[in-house]
Image: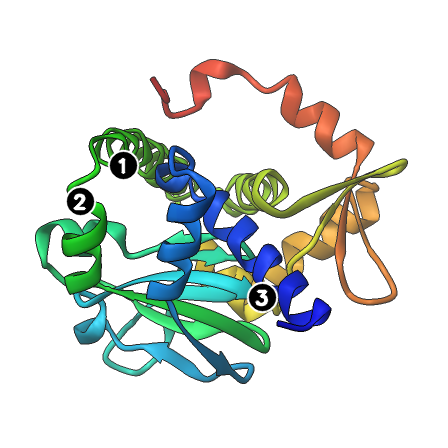
Amino acid sequence: MTMKSAMRLRNENHIISSIPFFSTLVPEEIEQVEQLFRKRHYAKEQIVLYEEETSSFMYLIYSGKVRVVKLNDEGKEQIITIHKRKDFFGEMSLLDGKTSPATIIAHEDSVIGFLAKSDFDEHLMRNEGIRSKIIDLLCTRLRDSWAMIKILSFNAENAQDRVMSLLERLGELYGVKDARGKIIDVKLTHQQMASYASVTRETMSRVLRSMERSGAISVLEDKAILLNRSFLETRDRKDPASSVAVI
């Protein structure tokens, strides 16, 4: 094995060990799990999996980002979430054999690893430590769902609250701290952000312009959104009673 290949294998094993329910495995077991994942390259906007295919695999992102969407009858997207490097998804489908109500699309050029349900059942579900960690994971997934419900809980007329909650959530998931505030490290068009928050594109653009004029956010040269300190401070001072409880 060349030095470059050995380094690549160590990096991939590190990604595997970052998955919570694999964290109890010893290095030899991590390497065995790595061999179970089948990797594929996807170009930006390429379909990774259709809804009807989601019951057969768990997926791990080795590089890039994907978005999880629900498509309506006209083919328009409702973004459910965006996954980045080291994120994984589909584990619930492996447990109950049911499809996830979503389609997976490469948000940028990506490398995705697939773990088949048969390998998951045969090699992993016999491990008591993994089963315990999966329960913890499902609780985390539930909290993530509550966070999305919080964004959609505002009345449609209160578009600014929806947009601000969306930006806050994007900052939590993809924020990179900066001396000026927090940069959202995921690129979304106004249409994609609008579908995420269930508002129109025109409304999203209008609210973002208003927030930029007020100094709450800044749009950087590469089109990334900077949540300025004033935005973060305002959200920190918000009334907890207006939030959906996360226990």
Q: Nearer the viewer, residue 100 or 18?
A: 18
Measuring 72% from the left and 67% from the top, which residue is drawn there?
3
Camera-side residue of 168 and 200: 168
Q: How crowded is mark 3: few (under 14 residues within 10 Å), some or many (20 or more)?
A: some
Quadrant of the frame with the N terminus: bottom right
Relative image position of residue 70 (x, y in whole percent): 30, 67
Q: Which residue is drawn at 35% across and 38% down?
A: 21
What kind of residue is marked 2? Met
- At x 27%, y 30%, the residue is 129
Marks 3 and 2 sit apart, C-alpha to C-alpha, by 26 Å
Label located before the other in sequence (3 or 2): 3
Q: In this view, does 26 lie to the left or right of 12?
A: left
| 155 lies above or below 185 | above
- Structural distance between the alpha carbons of marks 1 and 3: 24 Å
Q: Residue at x 27, y 77 (%)?
A: 50
Q: Could you tell me the amino acid type at mark 3?
A: Ser
Colour scheme of the picture:
rainbow
Q: Which of 133 and 143 is in front in this view?
A: 133
Q: Which amino acid does label 1 sit on?
A: Ile
Whether residue 235 is situated above or below residue 87 in the rendered picture: above
The residue indicated by pointer 3 is 63
Q: Can residue 145 be seen in this view?
A: yes
The residue tagged 1 is 130
CB under 8 Å between discs 2 and 1: yes
Q: Which of marks 2 and 1 is nearer the N terminus?
A: 2
**Residue 100 shows in the view:** no
Q: What element carries label 1?
A: helix
Find numbered disc 3 in the image and state the secondary structure of the residue it sits on: strand
Q: Which residue is disc 2 drawn over? A: 125
The residue sitting at the front extreme is: 1
Q: Residue 32, image x and y in percent?
A: 37, 56
Q: Based on the displayed image, in which of its 4 quarters is residue 40 positioned?
A: bottom left
